[in-house]
Image: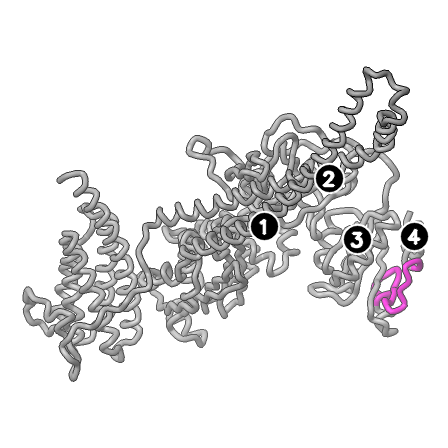
Amino acid sequence: MTGSDEEFERRLLETFREEAEEYLDAITEGLVELERAGASAGLPLIESVYRKTHSLKGAARAVNLRTIESVCQNIENIFALMKQGGTPPDAETYDRLHQAVTVVRMLLAWADDPSVPTTEVIAMLRESRLLLDGGKSVGAAAGPSPGQMAHPGQKDTAPEPKERGTVRIAAHKLDRLIAGADALLTTRLFLTQRMLELEDMFTRFSLWQWNYAQVGHDLRQLREATSETTGAALPPAFVLPLERTMEFLEYNREFVRLLQHDLGSHMRGTELDRSALEASTSEISDLIHDAVLVPIASILTPFSGFVREFSRTSGKAVEFIVEGGEVEVDRRILEAVADPLRHLIRNSIDHGIERPETRVQHGKPPAGTIRIWISPLTGSSVRIEVADDGRGIDGRVVRRAAVGKGLIGADEAGELTEDAAMRLIFRSGLSTSPFVTEISGRGLGLSIVEESVTRLGGTVGVVSTVGEGTTFTLAVPVNLATLRGVVVRSGRQIYVVPMQSVRQVSRVRREAILQQDRRPAIRFQGEVIEAIRLHEALGAAGASPLSDRHEQIPVVILSHGAGRIACMVDEVIRVQEIVVRPLGSQLRCVRLIEGAVILGNGNVALVLDPLELVQEALAAERSPLPAGPTGKVRRSVLVVEDSVTSRSLLQNLLERAGYYVETAADGMEGFAILKKHEFDIVISDVDMPVMDGFTLTEKIRANPRLARLPVVLVTSLDLPEDRDHGIAIGADAYIVKAGFKQPDLLDIIDSLMRGRH
């Protein structure tokens, strides 16, 4: 066989594999629908599966894959009997049909692998055909071909082939197209940078005009000195050179003016061209990225067979329902979420769905339901919900498991809200299953789910009700198009932080940086999170240490999964679109770096890996932050208020008055902060979710360490009984918002603090 023949055969097999996967997905989906329909399954559905099997058999014969052809022939024999109205297949027959489809998939991947149980599957299919045929012998012929099977009254003519609106294209070619489209962004960034440079050049002309105007009077005097009336007073040897110099200066002024005009016209034309190029390249890029969008059902269809097989081996009955499978998502996104979805489905079957007898005892139908619902969230992301109607997740069991694994302390477990307790199931190593099997119980599945989805720039949420079921919600981007990144400088190096992992960019005062376990930390949304200096985390040299003159430090809050850290940098430069380039095989193992980007000025910046950065920062020891400048000790105030507007108003008022202010959104959060940190006074609303101000005050007074802490209640509740109740439980002051005056509040705070100290 020549090289060209081998190449042709290789390409033919590639095409066959792609086509076979489509046929197998359709056959699997048809088998599930047939078994679900039972005896009421109509002839069109049977005919559809039969034709798909027949087409797959013919395609396998064309590429000389006789083993796959033989398996398909035996599947076709069973469907031929079903079409003739034979005995309906039982559950065991459907098991064998699903096994046959699995064997064909294995043969597609490992055509020459002798471990593939082809012979056994063919024997089981023949046995099933004998049972359906009432024990009659199996002839070599499987019955009429699909073309010979006409319905009564139907003409014996082949159907007209449908015009297909799609063409096949190799995945690697699509990837190359996407890479080329992403490269257009770099070109656009270069053009934008050139425009900025042109604008800077144009600005210099204005500076030149100003300087020229400064010497205008001197030039006029020189011009008069060289005129005919006064030129006689000058030495003859200077008159001619001076006249030539004046003429040149006049020519120079006109030349620069025309150059400025031409440069302005050139800039306007270039800006128009740049805008047109940006519009056209953006459209081309969008079209190419749309070309890789495929229905989510393409990865969910094979799950039907997986659910059926796994549920039967687990002794459970499960109905698998997919809604919204027509929603399209980037093929690369689907490949990345396939394993997380498989983990969630396996968890639902193994941990969620009860056995049939247990479900009946609890008034549920014997068969459990796993429902996947896909819906667009926005134009750039989709929501995937995986819900089951099983036993649900008990927050108390999760807390006990987390304490037993040492992930949290017993005191912390008691303070956790239900939502926070549910988030614990995504911690690596946490499992509520008392048994460890090859399927589950190791506490890794949900951790992998969160990590995989978060790496895509998505989020994972969970809601569960004991006895009713659990719903996992995944939000993932529609495509992996261009990303946005925060460009920062730390030391002498420029870095880019992917925007999807950035919770907030802000500045913090030096005195707001705390010390927690000899590590720097800051407060963020009522939580104390570790702070790192980026150049130290990366091991970069040459960064200037923070000095006393740094009154405010730029901070980038990173969030990846359940972990959050604050990265202290020297400068936050801008936010821009980025195209991440891989570092190559030689630098693939560089820690904390995801890739590189080319900035508009042509410089290369490293792209940080937020997940690795968060994980390493939380695990590693960091050197303590140098001590800040000494000065007057500031009094600290904790403001507990669920209204964002009221909370901001109180915070700004108190900070202007010189207090250091921390905030909490409800009483539970406020009390957790009080147990960890010292404050001089608490100002709290009364009507709040989770824990109201009255309960918070009672808890403060019942705590020996906090009992003497002044508490001021600022609320809209103006009834006398509310005021009396607040004073009775130990509030030091009760202020009604309707009569709120800022000076009065400050006076009350100052008076209470003086009384305490």
Q: Earlier in the sequence, mark 2 or mark 3?
A: 2
Image vertical order of residue 410 relative to residue 598, above or below: below
Label 2, label 4: how far apart the Cα atoms are:
30 Å
Residue 264 among magenta residues: no
On the image, numbered disc 1 is attached to which residue?
272
Image vertical order of residue 111 relative to residue 27, above or below: above
> Residue sitting at 79 percent across and 53 percent down?
638
Q: Earlier in the sequence, mark 2 or mark 4?
A: 2
On the image, numbered disc 3 is attached to which residue?
638
Label 2, label 1: how far apart the Cα atoms are:
40 Å
Label 1, label 3: how far apart the Cα atoms are:
54 Å
Q: Which mark is residue 553?
A: 2
Foreground mark, 4 or 1, reads 1
- Circle 3: residue type: Leu
Q: Earlier in the sequence, mark 4 or mark 1?
A: 1
* Mark 2 burial class by Cα count in 10 Å: few <14, some 14-19, many 20+: some
